[in-house]
């Protein structure tokens, strides 16, 4: 199993596949989905209550997968746990040998969520990055007699924009200062916007401090694209993509084609080290999009 951190630091275009989790999945189902994904991807990302739906905790999912030589990236948000619970999750991750974390504030709850839940936000995203880095570096909650330590590779999230002339990536600098080692962008399927954004990161030498992963959704219908655009703050899903899906005779196949085209384009954007692929539809769409992109020529299409 090649470490995700090692792949990010190489000249390879890293690809991760995000698992689709539900409240009813059992470990064999999780393993089957992850094994299928890692046939074409370098690692699997384990979401943290996407769409505010409960499921097996991401640390527990990773613990089920690690014995099977599957590289995992565990997502943690600040919305659903208080400080003590988050610290416990980090220590649990370390105890299982989980080495990749992706930290975020967490999206707001859907307005129609039933029964309604309360957001916690006891920590900010930067607080959580700093806490994970302190555990990684042995500066907090570390047992000096323990040999069960893991060198966390810590990621954070950011939103790609078309930067104005005087724009400076101050929040990204703060996340890098806190200990982030890679950045994953919100979905942006306007490649020219991504080029402008990454060019500014290159200018400010932030790409010397961390690698950047893009985010590529595979939509199974026009309505799925519209729903995603409404629900995901900072996402950039051009109307032309929604229209292509609406007019397609086979929306799933069109969604795969769009994602594959986007992946090929991203491979040519300076400063982009890889991409995460995910879908609200059948997880098999992720595998189909990666194969169709041609970025894994050693995998049968």
Image (cartoon, rainbow, N blue to C red):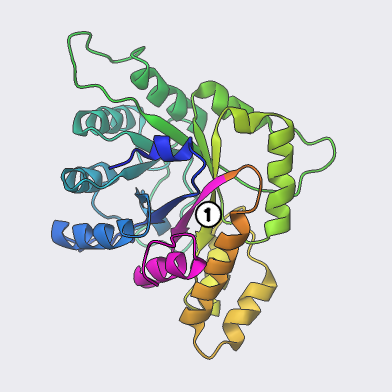
Q: Which residues are magenta?
A: 273-301
Asked whether, in this view, residue 190 is left or right of residue 10, the answer is: right
Identify the residue position indicated by label 1 in the image. 215
- Which residue in the rendered view is the most extreme toward the bottom? 249
Q: Is residue 276 magenta?
A: yes
Q: Where is residue 3 drawn, in percent x and y? A: 34, 38
* Residue 294 vs residue 125, the one in the foreground: 294
Residue drawn at x 46%, y 59% is 277
Image coordinates of residue 124 in percent, x first then y, are 49, 31
Q: Secondary structure at mark 1?
A: strand
Q: Residue 83, image x and y in percent?
A: 36, 28
Side (left or right) of 134 relative to 104: left
Query: In which quadrant of the rendered image does the N terminus lie?
Result: top left
Q: Please tell me whether residue 117 belongs to the stretch shown in magenta.
A: no
Q: Residue at x 73, y 42 (%)?
A: 199
Residue 78 visible in the shown view: no
Q: Quadrant of residue 79?
A: top left
Name the residue at 62% across, 46% down: 159
């Amino acid at each position: 199993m090649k470490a995700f951190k090692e792949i990010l630091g190489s000249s390879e275009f890293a690809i991760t596949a995000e698992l689709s989790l539900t409240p009813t999945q059992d470990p064999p189902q999780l393993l089957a989905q992850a094994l299928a994904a890692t046939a074409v991807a370098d690692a699997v990302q384990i979401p943290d209550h996407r769409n505010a739906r409960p499921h097996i905790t991401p640390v527990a999912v990773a613990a089920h997968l690690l014995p099977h030589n599957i590289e995992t990236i565990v997502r943690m948000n600040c919305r659903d746990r208080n400080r003590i619970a988050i610290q416990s999750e980090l220590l649990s991750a370390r105890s299982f040998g989980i080495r990749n974390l992706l930290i975020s504030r967490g999206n707001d709850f859907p307005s129609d969520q039933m029964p309604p839940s309360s957001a916690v936000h006891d920590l900010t995203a930067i607080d959580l990055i700093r806490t994970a880095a302190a555990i990684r570096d042995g500066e907090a909650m570390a047992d000096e007699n323990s040999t069960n330590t893991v060198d966390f590779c810590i990621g954070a999230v950011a939103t790609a924009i078309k930067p104005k002339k005087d724009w400076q990536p101050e929040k990204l600098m703060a996340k890098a200062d806190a200990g982030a080692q890679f950045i994953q962008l919100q979905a942006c399927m306007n490649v020219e916007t991504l080029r402008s954004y990454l060019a500014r990161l290159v200018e400010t030498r932030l790409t010397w401090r961390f690698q950047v992963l893009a985010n590529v959704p595979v939509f199974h219908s026009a309505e799925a694209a519209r729903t995603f655009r409404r629900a995901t703050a900072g996402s950039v899903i051009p109307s032309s993509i929604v229209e292509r899906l609406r007019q397609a005779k086979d929306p799933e196949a069109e969604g795969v084609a769009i994602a594959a085209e986007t992946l090929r384009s991203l491979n040519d954007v300076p400063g982009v080290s890889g991409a995460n692929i995910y879908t609200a539809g059948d997880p098999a769409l992720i595998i189909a999009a990666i194969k169709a992109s041609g970025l894994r020529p050693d995998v049968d299409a």
